[in-house]
Image (cartoon, rainbow, N blue to C red):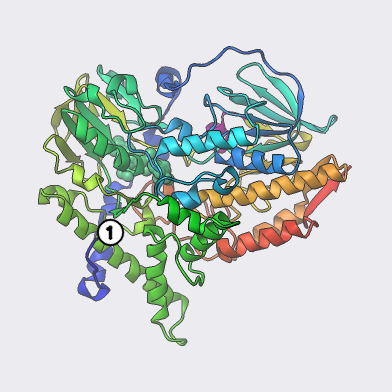
Amino acid sequence: MSKTVNATSFDKEALRKKYAAERDKRIRADGNDQYIEIKDQWGHYLEDPYIKVQEREPVSDHVTVAFIGGGFSGLVTGARCVENGIVDVRIIEKGGDFGGTWYWNRYPGAMCDTAAMIYMPLLEETGHRPTKKYAFAPEILQQCRRIGETYDLYNQALFHTEVTDLSWDDEQRVWRIQTNRGDDFTAQFVGMGTGPLHVPKLPGIPGIESFQGHSFHTSRWDYDYTGGSPDGLPLTKLKNKRVAIIGTGATSVQCVPALAESAETLFVFQRTPSSVDVRANEDIDPDWFDGIASEGWQMRWIENFTANQTGHPAEMDLVKDGWTDISRRVRSKISELSAEELTAENMMRAYEDADMEKMQEIRARCNSVVENQATAEDLKAWYGQLCKRPCFHDEYLQAYNQPGCHLIDTDGQGVERITESGLVVAGKEYEVDCIIYASGFEVGTPFERRNGYETTGRDGVKLSDYWSNGMRTLHGIHVHGFPNLFIVQATQGGNLISNYPHNLTESGNTIGMMVRHALDMQFREIEVSLEAENAWLELLKQAPPMMIGTTECTPGYYNNEGKGWEAGLTGGGYPYGPVAYFKYLNEWRDSGEFEGLEFRS
Ligand code: NDP
């Protein structure tokens, strides 16, 4: 465990200055434009290395529910529809199977970062017990397949299929869906769950096109080249190879240990270090699990985590991990304030104290784990813990103690140049056989670019136009002018990032019930009224400033590469927090009134 540090034992002002200096060093005018969009000459980086595309006839029929995206969103919504007796559900997925992010991300060492008991959807419904506190990717992918099989979602699914157009047909009052496989069919209801991180990007490093060795993106891992398997077999084909990995985000943190173990030489090119706290993964004891798995266990665990993580009173902390530790510390600091001291300013200060203490501990961990103290210094993250995705790992820092593993720190500037045979940093060339891009995914680019299709609603209004001044929804799910369309994601709803599937499950429950209600009452359309949408947006304005995504943070996708998000409503959530939101949403749908929605026959 890392050593406990007290806020009074360091100079807060000096730390603030250090954070600001490290951020300033990394700010770039080009923001998201520094990255290469993967298309045309780069298109091969998107090819599916896992499952061969199968020929099939295009479909041209009608279904009750179509869902775009076969990851957690599509699976939980599809499952809830089936539970509500709506079995005519077609999921359209660009991968070759269900799984979404877990279909694509099969890099060695991939595992969930939030405890499996609460992260893996529908465990209770499918009867699966996670094998570890943090399950590895193959187990999560298998759970996705299990959901697909349990709810018979494979039957109508279209894999290796990308939607190219989605339009509301005002006359027929159905959605028309066209795809890159020639499909042209209709659906009464459409769900969209395309996820925030599904379009890989490449760093726009000068000379990147000239590299003559092998290269791939982490979300399309080339096991033919590396050897090994997602199940953890060593990457034996790398034993005579010099490998570079670019990026040190959450993905790199998970795959560097396997690379360091197998490659002859590994160069890890770092622009900004991640904060890497203790993981403490452990096996789940079947007897213990049997003892806790009484009816409703998973929802109890999920709600307990959300309460703990978002500062709500909870008698116990069932998950007990790095995420709940963050908020436990903040709560404890705030509890030291007297009633008179409980001002917004003091609460922010308490938050900052807790955060700085935590980050001091995480930085000290670098010195205690990494033998080479210069490397340890370079691995220290100089920013607040929620400025970037917090990481937890028990082998990442240790990997730098392997003789063949070298951290190439670029002092915030990134790789200078790529040549035919290697990478250049500070004028020095590192020759390699292979470059692995752990350079992340498009987040701040336009929604329709990332989805690859436009959504056209009533009267030919395009979603991109309707949202041109910011996202507009009720609950993050419904959009006025887009009847029978449901969006499954967290923004403008629960906005809970620490356990994203909690948001998705709640949306899935809601959609299943709404569609059932519409079918029972023979309503053909469900649409949010403009008044209800406006009222929701007004309510969201009351939300306190977000702790995530501020421009005071070092740049990254959380804060739109340092530029921040447009003022207004883009990234916020329910003002009273996720616990209150999920309670509100439950009551809203259980009332059967679905206030704010218009149902039309
Ligand atoms: P990130 O966007 O977090 O990381 C990209 C990395 O590439 C950063 O370290 C970035 O540096 C670096 N980079 C970009 N350009 C250059 C350059 N020119 N030179 C050198 N380095 C460069 O992507 P990830 O795939 O790591 O993670 C994305 C998200 O996916 C995570 O934040 C998390 O939400 C999710 N994820 C979840 C996991 C889980 O739950 N198990 C596991 C893995 C990922 P810089 O920081 O300076 O921009």
Q: Residue at x 57, y 51 (%)?
A: 503
Q: In which quarter of the image is residue 386?
A: bottom left
Front residue of this view, candidates 506 and 357: 506
**Residue 545 locus on image (x, y percent):** 50, 63
| Magenta region, main secondary structure | helix
Can residue 188 be seen by looking at this rendering? yes
Front residue of this view, candidates 557 and 134: 134
**Residue 209 left/right relative to 376:** right
Label 1 CB less than 8 angstroms from ligand 1? no
Badge 1, how many Cα within 10 Å: few under 14, some, many 20+? some
**Residue 360 locus on image (x, y percent):** 24, 63
Image quadrant containing the C terminus: top right
Residue 460 within the magenta-colored segment of the rendering: no
Q: Which amino acid does label 1 sit on?
A: Tyr
Front residue of this view, candidates 29 and 451: 451
Q: Give the range drawn in magenta.
A: 446-453
**Residue 460 left/right relative to 126:** right
Q: Is residue 377 above or below residue 424?
A: below
Q: Mark 1 points at which residue?
A: 19
Q: Which residue is drawn at 26% across and 29% down?
A: 234
Q: In this view, does 172 lie above or below 319?
A: above
